[in-house]
Image: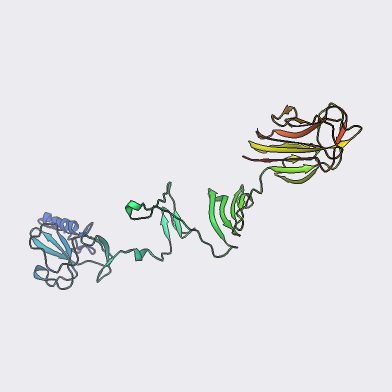
């Protein structure tokens, strides 16, 4: 059995050894000197005039007095005398005089500087970097500006750069590593917000044109349509205006077979309608207009009437209202002739609506 251990040269107890406490205490002294190593300085060539127990130095080249011939070693003042230890490659020590952490490379104490953290191939916080060069697995993260009082500007800017317009730059939001939303510049220089239920098929909720700043909501519930035939209205009876020709119908919320809009989600909706008079037998028809929710409830603020004589294919009446709806509510456009029968003219009779909030 060896007398000392290979790394810190700790003496070990031998079988039947006398005065075991001496060997044990010597090992403790070495541990006390070298574990959690903090050195007062690595630049002093002569020992302090009045050292106290526990003082430790890295002896540089040119050590003098009690340090003569001990260059490169660690000097530790113990029990009134200097004891010297030879560091091994990889030892780490904190130097008080320079407030720096250093690593011994086998010949010199090298400061751990910011340069050693440049051009790294990966950083993992709580995780490995197999999925991305920078990986953090944690429950909270904070980016804060360096305040003016702390020597900063108080600003915080984060830049995400891509090589060309056709590339991607943005944020990917996932649930259990399945993508559910995107925010950024994906394939163009337009700002895009998209969502997905399967991680493969995406629906754009918002697109901001990079050239004009114009905002588009491609999947906003909205419609606009007309009727391609004259809707006849008997005197005194409300009729649902048949809207069977649609210029657009996002979310397929308008049903041309029933001429009704059905709210796909809760929200605030805006609707408008336009009716143009066409003569049946008299110009004294007295057009009325309104919006009706769920087949029977007149929408407040949507009712209107023309009380004077009409001009054939010229007299019109409009309505507009903003109303809250819950998913499943329906809205339709209705018209009525108060005094004589008439027609609501084809192609010029329109109905539109969209979600506003």
125 lies above or below 41:
above
Q: In which quarter of the image is the N terminus?
A: bottom left
Tell me: 285 left or right of 49. right
Tell me: 109 left or right of 182. left
- Of 286 and 176, nearer the camera is 286
- At horizontal 37% and vertical 53% (from top left) the residue drawn is 146
- Of 76 and 271, nearer the camera is 271
Residue 177 image position (x, y, % from top left) = 53, 51
Residue 159 image position (x, y, % from top left) = 48, 58
- At horizontal 57% and vertical 49% (from top left) the residue drawn is 181
Tell me: 134 left or right of 44. right
- Of 202 and 31, nearer the camera is 202
Quadrant of res 13: bottom left
Q: Quadrant of the C terminus?
A: top right
- Of 283 and 254, nearer the camera is 283
Quadrant of res 19: bottom left
Tell me: 341 left or right of 189. right
For the question of whether residue 15 can be seen, the reply is no
303 lies above or below 170:
above
User: Farthest residue in the front direction?
Assistant: 308
310 lies above or below 67:
above
Residue 350 image position (x, y, % from top left) = 78, 41
Numbered disc total: 0
For the question of whether residue 249 can be seen, the reply is yes
Residue 122 image position (x, y, % from top left) = 43, 61
């Amino acid at each position: 059995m060896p007398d000392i251990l290979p790394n810190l040269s700790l003496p070990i107890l031998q079988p039947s050894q006398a005065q075991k406490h001496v060997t044990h205490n010597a090992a403790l002294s070495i541990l006390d000197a070298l574990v959690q190593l903090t050195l007062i300085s690595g630049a002093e060539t002569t020992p302090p005039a009045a050292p106290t127990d526990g003082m430790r130095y890295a002896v540089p080249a040119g050590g003098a007095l009690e340090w003569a011939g001990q260059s490169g070693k660690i000097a530790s003042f113990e029990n009134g005398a200097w004891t010297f230890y030879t560091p091994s490659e990889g030892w780490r020590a904190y130097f008080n005089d320079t407030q720096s952490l250093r690593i011994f490379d086998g010949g010199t104490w090298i400061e751990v500087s910011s340069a050693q953290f440049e051009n790294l191939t990966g950083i993992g916080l709580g995780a490995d970097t197999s999925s991305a060069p920078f990986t953090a697995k944690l429950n909270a993260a904070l980016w804060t500006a360096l305040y003016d009082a702390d020597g900063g500007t108080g600003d915080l800017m984060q830049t995400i750069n891509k090589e060309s317009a056709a590339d991607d730059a943005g944020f990917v939001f996932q649930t259990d590593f399945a993508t559910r939303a995107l925010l950024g510049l994906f394939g163009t220089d337009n700002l895009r917000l998209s969502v997905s239920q399967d991680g493969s098929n995406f629906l754009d909720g918002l697109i901001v044109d990079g050239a004009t700043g114009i905002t588009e909501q491609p999947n906003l519930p909205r419609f606009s349509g007309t009727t391609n035939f004259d809707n006849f209205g008997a005197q005194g009876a409300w009729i649902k205006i048949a809207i069977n020709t649609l210029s657009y119908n996002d979310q397929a919320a308008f049903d041309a077979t029933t001429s009704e809009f059905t709210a796909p989600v809760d929200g605030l909706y805006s609707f408008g309608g336009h009716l143009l008079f066409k003569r049946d037998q008299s110009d004294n028809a007295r057009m009325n207009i309104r919006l009706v929710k769920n087949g029977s409830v007149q929408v407040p603020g949507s009712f209107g009437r023309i009380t004077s004589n009409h001009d054939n294919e010229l007299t019109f009446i409009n309505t507009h209202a903003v109303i809250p709806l819950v998913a499943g509510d329906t809205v339709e456009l209705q018209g009525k002739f108060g005094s004589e029968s008439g027609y609501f003219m084809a192609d010029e009779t329109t109905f539109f609506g969209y979600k506003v909030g």
